[in-house]
Image (cartoon, rainbow, N blue to C red):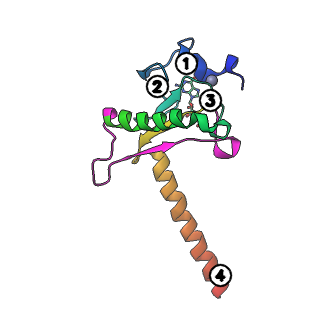
C-alpha cells in the first residue's frame, strides 16, 4: 500500500479520525476500531514503513523507541506487569502470513487476560487433546 492511501498515515496526520491516547513528533497511539479487549491500543510510527520486513538497520532506533513507548503506555493504561498474573501482550503482525491487515507498521498492545491470550491457551489445550488422542490411536 502506498503512503498516499494508507489509513494509518491519514490517522497520524489527522486526516482521518481516531481516539488518540498519545501523540508526539514520531508516534501516535490510538484505540483499535475493533478492540480484542477493553484496552487495545495501536502504537504507530508517523513514518510510513509497510512491514517489519521492510525495515532496515537505520530503523532500529525508531523500532526501539516504539517498543519503549508500548511499555510506557501500558503503565499509563494500568495494564503493566506489576507481579502475579498481570502483564500485557505486544504483537506486530507481518505480512499476510502473519495476519497483517494494515500495511503501515504498528504494535498492538492489550492486557494478557484479553481474548487473544485466552484463544491462544485454548488452541494449545485443543492441540494437546488432539495429540493425546492420536497417540492413543497409534497405541491401539
Ligand atoms: P493488523 O492485523 O494489521 O496487525 O492490525 C490492524 C488493526 O487495525 C486491526 O486490529 C484493526 O481493527 C485496526 N484498524 C483498521 N482500520 C482502522 C481504523 O480506521 N481505525 C482504527 N482505530 N483502527 C483500525
Ligand atoms: Zn502509512
Q: Give the residue furthest to the top.
A: 15
CA gap between label 4 and label 1 equals 54 Å
- Residue 21 location, x and y as percent? 40, 23
- Magenta span dominant secondary structure: loop
Nearest to N terminus: mark 4 or mark 1: 1
Q: SS class of the residue under badge 2?
A: strand
- Residue 79 location, x and y as percent? 34, 40
Q: Residues within 10 Å of mark 2 (few under 14, many from 20)?
A: some
CA gap between label 4 and label 2 equals 50 Å
Residue placed under numbered mark 3 in the picture: 104
- In this figure, what is the number of numbered marks? 4
- Residue 12 location, x and y as percent? 53, 19
Q: Is residue 31 left or right of residue 2?
A: left
Q: Nearer the viewer, mark 4 or mark 1?
A: 1
Q: Nearer the viewer, mark 4 or mark 2?
A: 2
Ligand 1, by image quadrant, is top right
Asked if the residue at tag 1 contacts the one at tag 2, i.e. Cβ–Cβ closer than 8 Å, the answer is yes
Nearest to N terminus: mark 3 or mark 4: 3
Residue placed under numbered mark 4 in the picture: 137
Residue range in magenta is: 76-101
Marker disc for residue 11: 1
Residue placed under numbered mark 2 in the picture: 30
CA gap between label 3 and label 2 equals 14 Å
CA gap between label 1 and label 3 equals 11 Å
Q: Residue at (64%, 45%) from the top-left corner?
A: 98
Asked whether mark 3 lies closer than 8 Å to ligand 2, one says: yes
CA gap between label 3 and label 4 equals 47 Å
Amino acid at each position: 500500500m502506498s503512503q498516499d492511501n494508507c489509513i494509518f498515515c491519514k490517522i497520524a496526520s489527522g486526516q482521518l479520525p481516531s481516539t488518540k491516547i498519545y501523540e508526539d513528533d514520531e508516534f501516535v497511539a490510538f484505540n483499535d476500531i475493533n478492540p480484542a479487549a477493553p484496552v487495545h491500543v495501536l502504537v504507530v510510527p508517523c513514518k510510513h514503513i509497510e512491514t517489519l520486513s521492510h525495515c532496515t538497520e537505520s530503523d532500529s532506533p525508531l523500532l526501539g523507541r516504539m517498543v519503549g513507548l508500548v511499555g510506557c503506555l501500558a503503565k499509563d493504561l494500568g495494564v503493566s506487569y506489576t507481579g502475579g498474573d498481570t502483564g500485557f501482550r505486544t504483537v506486530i503482525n507481518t505480512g499476510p502470513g502473519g495476519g497483517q491487515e494494515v500495511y503501515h507498521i504498528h504494535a498492538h498492545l492489550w492486557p494478557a487476560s484479553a481474548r487473544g491470550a485466552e484463544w491462544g491457551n485454548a488452541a494449545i489445550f485443543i492441540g494437546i487433546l488432539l495429540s493425546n488422542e492420536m497417540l492413543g490411536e497409534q497405541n491401539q
